Image (spheres, rainbow, N blue to C red):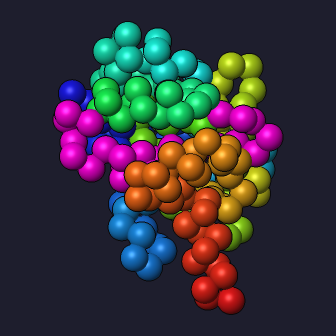
Amino acid sequence: MLLPWNMRSNQGFQVDTEIKESTIAGAGTGRFTKVPISDGAVIRTDTIQPVDAFIASGGTAEDHTVAVEVKDVADLDKLAAFWGPHDERTKQMMSWFVSGVPGIPALFALSHSFHCNHSQPGNMKPQVRDGCLQFVAVVDIAAGAELITDYTTYGIPPFCKSWMAENGFEDVRTKEQQRNRIEN
């Protein structure tokens, strides 16, 4: 079974990118643009698909990507049960790869992982538009720059925070907010 966190494709990207060692200490790999990107340009777009439809379709497909819409704890449990038999780290990976958009009471898991890292300020942000999850540049981005997003701005619904805590993990927003408090 193809698992989102193992997918390192360019599916969904509207610009040419590559994955290589991150410029952020300790972050592992990151995604870099190969071309200049203008402020406001769409970097990536994924059609939104409900969890049940994603699972019914067989899950992650090699040739296209979707943003799996997670609306509640039942959806998180369904994804964990679907992916769990194929990777013992599923719930941990979900804590890293499930994120939200400010003002939207749902979460999204990209079926082909973005492989971008957190930093402040980010150079892109997520938004929902026309039935798609998009990542949009918030500044002009030079060719060769790492694509980064500010996890502390993500919308993480309370049901997600509770589910993560019950499973011994934290969502990316909470993790970064705590790190910022410790460093300051």
Q: Nearer the viewer, residue 108 or 171?
A: 171
Q: Residue at x 41, y 51 (%)?
A: 167
Q: Which residues are magenta?
A: 84-106
Residue 160, percent across and down? 57, 45
Whether 146 is drawn above or below 11: the answer is below
Q: Residue at x 64, y 79 (%)?
A: 180
Whether 7 is drawn above or below 81: the answer is below
Residue 183, percent across and down? 61, 88
In the displayed structure image, the side of residue 145 where residue 132 appears, left or right = right
Does the image show residue 145? no
Determine the image quadrant of residue 159: top right
Residue 162, percent across and down? 56, 49
In the displayed structure image, the side of residue 41 where residue 12 appears, left or right = left
Q: Is residue 12 covered in magenta?
A: no
Q: Is residue 93 covered in magenta?
A: yes
Whether 22 is drawn above or below 49: the answer is below
Q: Residue at x 46, y 12 (%)?
A: 53
Whether 31 is drawn above or below 9: the answer is below
Does the image show residue 80? yes
In the displayed structure image, the side of residue 150 where residue 55 appears, left or right = left
Determine the image quadrant of residue 22: bottom left
Q: Residue at x 68, y 62 (%)?
A: 152
